[in-house]
Structures are given as structure tokens and as C-alpha cells.
Amino acid sequence: MRTRPDVPELRSILRDADHVDVKTATADGTLRQFAAGALDMRPAWLTGLFKVRDAAARVLRLDPAGRLDQRLTPENLPFTPGAKVHFFTVTEAVEDRYLLLETADRHLTAHLAIVAASDGDPTRFDLISVVRYHRRLGSLYFNLIRPFHLLVVGGMARAGARAA
């Protein structure tokens, strides 16, 4: 597990985490440009995955994933705690440093941190996924979707790099 030690805000979400993964991309651009591109990724296959997820969620009595109605741009991407970004909520953010998002359900809580490390050109961006299960259903659900999660976050890293 590789995380940014210079982002103390991540320590509390990493403690007792059941799953952590990191995807990295490099790009010439800002955190806002990268994050907007990553979070606005919506190829047809992803739309299909969300439809399958929502059908499975109904069977498992979970909340639907939420909607991806708003198109994100660097200018309209909120960095204000409490603001909504699709089905995520902004929990912490520091301009040009990191953006921490959270989504929670009865079965698990998931965080997505997008961290910029501008220790040279180009900037390295880490997408850090952190999942904490609330009960056995959380583990079952996440292990079922894990391969898709890795594809989605990898795609987000590539989309963010293209946008930045």
C-alpha cells in the first residue's frame, strides 16, 4: 500500500480500512483538471455497469448508486466540504493538493482521495480508494465488484491524465 505521508487527512480513513488500492497517473495540469476529467468519465460500458449494479442493489436492498447528471469541469468541481460530486460527498479538500470524497451505504463506506504530488514535471496524481465494511454484506458486495472497481478507477486515472 502506497499513500502520501504528507496528507495527514488520509490517516483517519486508512485506519481500520478493509481495502485500499492506489492507481497512479502523471500529467501536466492541475488537480482540478485531473479530478474533473477522472470523475466525469462515463463511457457506455460504465453506464451499463451502473445499471447492473443498481439491479443487484435492489435485490440486496442497498441504496442505488446515484446519478451522474452533472457534467464536471475544473470550474464547477466543488472543493467545499459537504458539496455533492455525483454520488460522492466532499469531505476535505486543499486546492492543488488533494480532494477527499466519501460515499456511504448500510453495508460499507468508501472514500476516494485524489492526491497531487507536484515534486516535478509532470505532476503525479494518486487515486486512492479506501473501503470499510459495515457488515458481512459489505465484504460480499465489494469482493463481487472488486474487478470492476479496479477497471473503473484505472479508467478514471487515464481519463484524468487526458483531461489535465
Image: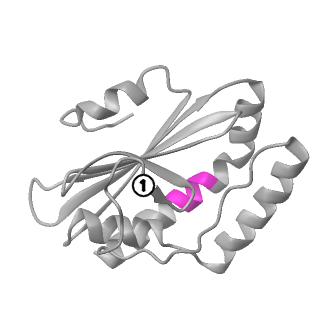
> Is 26 included in the stretch rendered in magenta?
no
Q: Which residues are magenta?
A: 149-153
Residue 28 x/y as whole percent:
19, 72
Q: How many marks?
A: 1
Residue 116 x/y as whole percent:
23, 54
Secondary structure of the magenta portion, mostly? helix
Residue at (64, 66) in percent of width and height: 67
Residue 115 x/y as whole percent:
28, 50
Q: Residue furthest left?
A: 120
Residue at (47, 50) in percent of width and height: 89
Q: Is residue 108 left or right of residue 120?
A: right
Q: Secondary structure at mark 1?
A: loop
Q: Is residue 106 above or below residue 32?
A: above
- Which residue is labeled 1 in the image? 83
Q: If the image is split into quadrants, where does the N terminus sit?
A: top left
Q: Is residue 147 left or right of residue 19?
A: right
Q: Quadrant of residue 148?
A: bottom right
> In this orientation, which residue lies closer to the viewer: 26 or 137?
137
Q: Is residue 121 above or below residue 73?
A: above
Residue 18 x/y as whole percent:
56, 27
Q: Quadrant of residue 45?
A: bottom right
Q: If the image is split into quadrants, where does the C terminus sit?
A: bottom left
Residue at (80, 62) in percent of width and height: 52
- Please name the amino acid that badge 1 sits on: Ala
